[in-house]
Image (cartoon, rainbow, N blue to C red):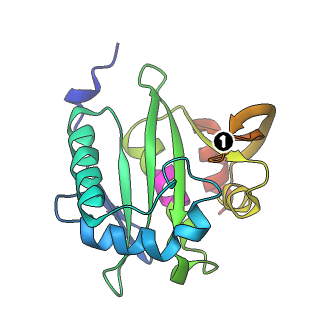
Amino acid sequence: MINPILLDIPESFETARLLIRVPRPGDGPELNAAVLETFDDLHPWMPWAKERPSVEQSEEYSRRAYAQFITREDITLRLIHKESGLILGSSGLHPRDWNVPRFEIGYWCRKRFQGQGYTTEAVRGILRFGFENLGAKRIEVHCDSLNLRSLRVAERAGLRREAEFPNGLTSPNGELRTKVVFGMTDEHWNAFNARR
């Protein structure tokens, strides 16, 4: 059995336009600005976006996320725009079974950076990190079937649409929705990478 707390996991890596790193104490004000700017886009899809957070709540979340990275309970990732230094969004490589190892990627992009390919770039970078640094055997993305932008990111990043689960999730307002699961295995990653 893998003991994930003993794994040496880099705290950051880069793509062409992004620095992708774990949360840090002090991220709260900038994270809060990104969430507030994007709140109307996040609210319909993200269970945690029920109310606009305070700066203190965003800082507390950042510190808890860093602590969870240290214990390997979770791997939350900040997407930092290299050119401006702004938090462009947030993602994560969430461990679902360290024994496989299997992870799930979640993501959102700050309003002013949407529609420019940043989220797809981030997801591809996180896939690379998961397969090449963490030895992942399977990585998934789970989406609400009505969240078309999120579905397109998963498709453009190269994941395969594998299954739909009617009544597989609830929306933030409590409605039952269809969950769409995308997946990629390490073999699929190697084949996908060879074609690029």
The dominant secondary structure in magenta is: helix
Q: Which residues are magenta?
A: 123-128
Above-or-below relation of 3 to 67: above
Badge 1 is on which residue? 188
Query: Where in the figure is residue 156, as x and y percent of width and height?
Result: 70, 62
Quadrant position of residue 116: bottom right
- In the figure, is residue 99 to the left or right of 170? left
**Crowd class of label 1 (few under 14; some 14 to 19; many from 20; radius 10 Å):** some
The one nearer the camera, 61 or 132, is: 61
The one nearer the camera, 51 or 133, is: 51
Asked which secondary structure carries label 1, the reply is helix
Q: Amino acid at mark 1?
A: His
Quarter holding the N terminus? Answer: top left
Q: Residue furthest top?
A: 1
Residue 170 can be seen in this image = yes
**127 falls in the magenta region:** yes
**Residue drawn at point x = 34 percent, y = 87 percent:** 84
Query: Where in the figure is residue 125, as x and y percent of width and height?
Result: 48, 59
Query: Where in the figure is residue 124, as x and y percent of width and height?
Result: 55, 59
